[in-house]
Image (tube, rainbow, N blue to C red):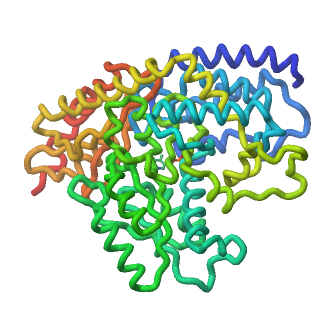
Amino acid sequence: MNHDDLRHWSKRAADWTHAYHTGLRDRPVRAQTTPGATAARLPDHPPEQPEDLEAIFADFEAIVPDAMTHWQHPRFFAYFPSNAAPASMLAEQLTNAISAMCMLWQTSPAATEIEQVMVQWLRQALGLAPHFTGTIHDSATTCTLSAVITMRDRATGWDSVQNGITGRAPIRIYASAQTHSSIDKSVRLAGIGQGNLVKVATEPDFGMDPAALDAAIRADLQAGLLPAGVVLCTGGTSIGACDPIAACLEVAKRHGLYAHVDAAWAGNAMICPEFRHLWEGVDGADSVVFNPYKGLGAQFDGAVQFLADPAPQIRSMGLRPDYLQTLGHEDITNFNEWTVPLGRRFRALKLWFLLRAYGLEGLREKMRNHIAWTAELADKFRTNPDFRITTEPCLALFTFQYAPADADADALTERLLKRINDDGRIYLTQTTHEGRFVIRMTAGTFDCTREDVMTVYDVATELAQTLQGSFIRP
Ligand SMILES: *Cc1c(COP(=O)(O)O)cnc(C)c1O
């Protein structure tokens, strides 16, 4: 295959893409396949001789789409959205065509500078203070890992950068139990250890209790441990819990701790001023992450980390060996010094296309619609006595149970969820809330309509009928 062939096949791929997206509603949302089924359709050995593109493309069409869960399906309501706007897909084709490594300004001047400008555009879009700068990582996990590594080294007075953390007082990180498992993973990877992640108690609204945070830090200081940083969440993954950012930051600052805010999903909603009360005080944070692929439509990968001051993170992670020096330029930005990997993709291009093709007003309208339709759906469930809203909507997320009188609601809800996902018209996932099995409902696919969201009520009530009587307690 050469570049003339690529031109031909790119057009074929574009036609396929159009047919795929316009036909998504006719497909089951979740892959209807079994483990091992796809692998069994592939040969055991790689081909020795080149194969014809017709055959390769035909196999793609025959094997792949039916064995995928369709994240861009308008009735995908599981996990969090990983939504993709057409303008973002187009930019990714161009990024792919250029295929540059964007680790130094010199290796990718336009990518570096567009990334700097997009971070500033997004900072303004989210209403963050002008002192924030930032960078674009692959995922929120990497942003949080970067922040946790910075907390660790800062707490040791940067001695750990050279000497590691063995033989010193345990480093302590604080977060609520509502924060994402990426915090747990980050403390493991940073060598701090899961046992030194303190899960701080929450208040009745499931946000962190600032007094409990203060008490935990004091107790650790008393015990000779080394408090290093706090990870707060705006929009926790399970039910959308929000920590009281201003009050918790006040505690963190009083103890001189570094503070990172994980708003991977909810940060997207901050393009609308009316939701910014959810992270009131965020301008006091040292680091803030949000994933534009969880709502704005800039497809994975890409996570924006805003930094009040990039210097501490660069001090932890920035290396500049001789072969990466840019001779004659001391003051340029080399983004690999801000991030974990050396090689970096040109992720800013899709943000540039996205923000221009829809405008902030266009994106706000989508966000407001998803949130309003989700609230309307919750109200619909509320009118049905067989269903129970277990957590109220936070932005476009709520949880519910199927709980007819006298029934074992956990078992029945689990049965209903399985039936819903086997049916295929919609896709929902679960979480455990206060020990109960609940269904999570969240909207956010770029092409999702009000009718798509209301389908959830119709499908859930229709399939619930088929379970009636099967799980009544004796
Ligand atoms: C999705 C999510 C993450 C993880 O995001 P990745 O980009 O997949 O690493 C972390 N925190 C929260 C709150 C999330 O919703």
The residue sitting at 52% across, 44% down in the picture is 34
Against 66, residue 361 (above or below) is above
> Is residue 31 in view from this perspective?
no
The residue sitting at 73% across, 24% down in the picture is 94
Against 143, residue 30 (above or below) is above
**Residue 409: x and y, percent?**
19, 50
Against 115, residue 207 (above or below) is below
- Foreground pick, 140 / 220: 220
- Foreground pick, 395 / 159: 159
Q: Quadrant of the C terminus?
A: bottom left
In the figure, is residue 381 to the left or right of 428?
left
**Residue 290: x and y, percent?**
50, 42
> Is residue 225 in view from this perspective?
yes
**Residue 389: x and y, percent?**
19, 42
In the figure, is residue 241 to the left or right of 59?
left
The residue sitting at 54% across, 43% down in the picture is 132
Q: Quadrant of the N terminus?
A: top right
- Foreground pick, 370 / 353: 353
Q: Count up the numbered dots.
A: 0
The residue sitting at 20% across, 56% down in the picture is 204
**Residue 247: x and y, percent?**
32, 56
In the figure, is residue 443 to the left or right of 376?
right
